[in-house]
Amino acid sequence: MRKVANLGLKTTYEERQAVHRLIKKLLALPYLPSGHIQGAFDNLRQLANTPALRELFQYVQDTWLDSDVWGIRQWSVFWLTVRTNNDVEGWHRRMIGRAGKAKLQFYVLVPLLMKEANQLSIIMRLVDEQQLTRYQRTTYRRIHGALFELWSEYEENTITTSLFLRKVGQIIAPAVPRPEQ
């Protein structure tokens, strides 16, 4: 969304018309299987009918699709539970609690990380045996449930790629207020 704003498309996006729908579909691309992303992107790119939209699509092409750093497989989240900053913050808060203070010095941090690494095999076994679950807020549980339902429909070919992207875009894309009439 930062690139959308930098290209001067924020106001157009907020009007909730064709550009809004196109950008939401573009933001939903990572939710497709990695092998379907390039084709879906190419189809969406044909709808980019302004210089700013063409520049946005070129940015996505250069930064994400043609990246030397990561391939499409690395950023596709098809059938994956989406992790948020809350997950990292929870882990960080737990580490601070174990240390007993917020500012950890290196010699305190290393043993804590070693203990965490040693517990990893146990944690993995508990997850495999479904004995360890993760607390999930109702909002995220609803979002993930809707995504898993859409993934299932997509794999069963009961919805088109375009409809899939539109529905995922409605779930994950930033909400904007409706313009005043």
Image: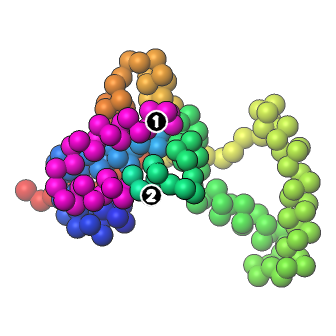
Please, what is the three-letter code of the amino acid marked with disc 1?
A: Leu
Give coordinates of residue 48: x percent, y percent: 21, 48
In front: mark 2 or mark 1?
A: 2
> Is 98 situated left or right of 69 in this image?
right
Please, what is the three-letter code of the amino acid marked with disc 2?
A: Thr
Magenta stretch encompasses residue 125: no
Q: Residue at x 44, y 33 (%)?
A: 36
Q: Is residue 52 above or below residue 71?
A: below
Q: Which residues are magenta?
A: 32-60
> Who comes first in sequence, dot 2 or dot 1?
1
Q: Which residue is mark 2?
A: 63
What's the mark number on residue 43?
Answer: none
Give coordinates of residue 132: x percent, y percent: 77, 40
Magenta stretch encompasses residue 56: yes
Q: Residue at x 35, y 41 (%)?
A: 41
Q: Residue at x 7, y 56 (%)?
A: 181
Give coordinates of residue 149: x percent, y percent: 47, 28
